């Protein structure tokens, strides 16, 4: 068990969300238009327009 | 444009407001993508701010300006075209307020919606999710699901005679100018803290697609001539992913490793390992590198050249490079710097300036690509 006062390193940006929402969204969109294997990102896609 | 005005108004109100009561973040990002026959420029705005004591609102708006050699993505020969896609999204997350230490008090619920439109394709997505922190916040469990409703037309055809009629249903002839696609999706994920320097996460995604999934402008080469693309109307997609993060305190370095396995009932299997290394540079900057490998097998109906077709049966044919077996690699370098490093003060001291450069190797007809991002994230209080 890791207690709250021991989580200084876990709270760092690099250990939580090192990639911004816009960067992740663009990455998923780009992959969706160039790769057949979508998914694994935690949310269905849509609106690719590149079928 | 309306959402942009709302976001700008929000920032102005934040600046004019009295003593700080809540926090928010506004981010602007521009992306440039270039490959052999396609160029994309995508400016976007993201906003996130507190709503009350237990709520968080997030919103985004973006424009895709696409210039490509063909409206049939990946097609070998056609006239160049330019078009724009507009996308807006809105989400809300609420932390439930139950009795202290009760299970209800550990739960967050949320909803997201997204709308995207371009000349020949519209898409609307709505979804919900539930998250719970358990084991004294050493683990987080999340469940979510959503529904996407898409509509595709032949409006992007490059012929003055109008677009080709579309075969919405593979069992019926091509008689329509527009078709629909409905996607039902769900996911589950778990993350677990292992030590004060390490954590792991696993996730599973499932999506069921029903409707038109081909490209109305693309044709496949057969021994009987060029024929319009026909993809199955149904597809079941599944993806498993796992990741681990480890922080090396002595060097202020974070190591991230991830792997994803995908398969669907079109017989496509894909493996995607990825590694990222993030190095803190002082207290105000970080630099990172990323390597991602991707390999997929072909769909069961992909052929480079099809034989003469038997018109008495359903013939699935495609000219989509995404349906072929191929592999590729992505190499990325990123630099992030806080405004304080440049002597900025106030909210600007916490602003993050970011630059990203990617090179993508694609062993298929798309060819290699380069991607560049520049971004600014500005925190604010109101």
Image (cartoon, coloured by chain):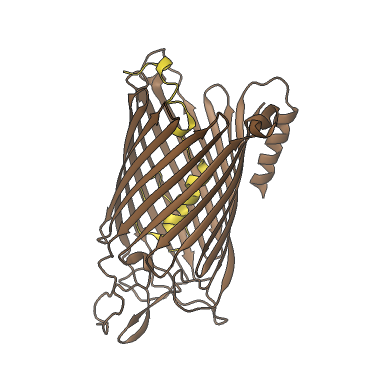
Task: Count numbered badges in the picture.
Answer: 0
| Left-right relation of A23 to B203 | right
Check the rendered structure and report the hue given to chain A. yellow
Q: In which quarter of the image is residue B221?
A: bottom left
Residue A38 visible in the current orientation: no
For the residue pair B323 and B113, the one nearer the viewer reads as B323
Rendered residue at 52%/75% (across/down): B157
In this picture, is A19 found above or below B219?
Answer: above
For the residue pair B201 and B231, the one nearer the viewer reads as B201
| Left-right relation of B4 to B122 | right
Residue B302 visible in the current orientation: yes
**Picture coordinates of residue B10, whole percent (x, y):** 68, 35
Name of the residue lying farthest toward the top? B100
Rendered residue at 44%/74% (across/down): B75
| Left-right relation of B312 to B344 | left
Name of the residue lying farthest toward the front? B250
Quadrant location, the C terminus of chain A: bottom left
For the residue pair B12 and B37, the one nearer the viewer reads as B37
Q: Quadrant of residue B360?
A: bottom left
**Picture coordinates of residue B303, whole percent (x, y):** 29, 74
In this picture, is B202 found above or below B64?
Answer: above
**Picture coordinates of residue B256, whole percent (x, y):** 38, 38
Name of the residue lying farthest toward the bottom? B224
Q: In which quarter of the image is residue B324?
A: bottom left
Quadrant location, the N terminus of chain A: top left
Rendered residue at 55%/64% (across/down): B39
Give the letter of the brown chain: B
In this picture, is B173 found above or below B188?
Answer: below
**Picture coordinates of residue B85, whole percent (x, y):** 56, 59
């Amino acid at each position: 068990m890791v207690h709250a006062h021991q989580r200084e390193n876990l709270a760092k940006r690099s250990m939580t969300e090192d990639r911004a929402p816009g960067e992740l969204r663009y990455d998923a969109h780009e992959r969706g238009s160039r790769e057949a294997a979508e998914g694994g990102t935690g949310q269905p896609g849509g609106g690719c327009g590149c079928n | 444009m309306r959402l942009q005005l709302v976001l700008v108004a929000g920032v102005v109100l934040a600046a004019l407001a009295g003593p700080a009561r809540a926090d928010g973040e506004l981010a602007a990002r521009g992306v440039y993508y270039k490959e052999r026959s396609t160029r994309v420029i995508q400016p976007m705005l993201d906003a996130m701010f507190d709503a009350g004591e237990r709520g968080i609102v997030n919103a985004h708006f973006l424009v895709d300006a696409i210039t490509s050699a063909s409206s049939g993505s990946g097609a070998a020969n056609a006239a160049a075209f330019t078009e724009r896609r507009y996308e807006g999204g809105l989400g809300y997350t609420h932390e439930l307020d139950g009795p202290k230490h009760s299970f209800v008090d550990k739960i967050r619920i949320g909803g997201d919606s997204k709308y995207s439109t371009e000349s020949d394709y519209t898409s609307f997505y709505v979804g919900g999710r539930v998250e719970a922190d358990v084991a004294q916040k050493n683990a987080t469990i999340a469940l979510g699901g959503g529904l996407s409703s898409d509509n595709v037309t032949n409006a992007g055809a490059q012929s003055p005679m109008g677009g080709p009629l579309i075969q919405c249903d593979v069992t019926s002839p091509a008689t329509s100018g527009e078709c629909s696609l409905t996607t039902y999706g769900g996911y589950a994920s778990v993350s677990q803290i292992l030590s004060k320097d390490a954590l792991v996460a696993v996730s599973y995604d499932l999506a069921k697609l029903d409707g038109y999934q081909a490209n109305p402008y693309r044709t496949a080469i057969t021994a009987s001539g060029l024929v319009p693309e026909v993809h199955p109307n149904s597809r079941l997609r599944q993806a498993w992913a796992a990741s681990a993060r480890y922080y090396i305190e002595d060097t202020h370095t974070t190591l991230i490793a991830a792997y994803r396995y995908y398969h669907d009932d079109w017989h496509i299997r894909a493996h995607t390992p990825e590694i990222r290394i993030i190095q803190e540079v002082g207290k105000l900057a970080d630099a990172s590198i990323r390597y991602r490998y991707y390999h997929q097998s072909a769909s069961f109906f992909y052929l480079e050249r099809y034989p003469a077709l038997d018109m008495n049966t359903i013939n699935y044919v495609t000219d989509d490079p995404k349906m072929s077996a191929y592999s590729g690699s992505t190499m990325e370098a990123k630099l992030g710097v806080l405004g304080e490093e440049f002597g900025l003060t106030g909210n600007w001291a916490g602003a993050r300036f970011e630059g990203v450069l990617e090179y993508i190797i694609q062993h298929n007809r798309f060819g290699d690509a380069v991607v560049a991002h520049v971004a600014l994230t500005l925190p604010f209080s109101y």
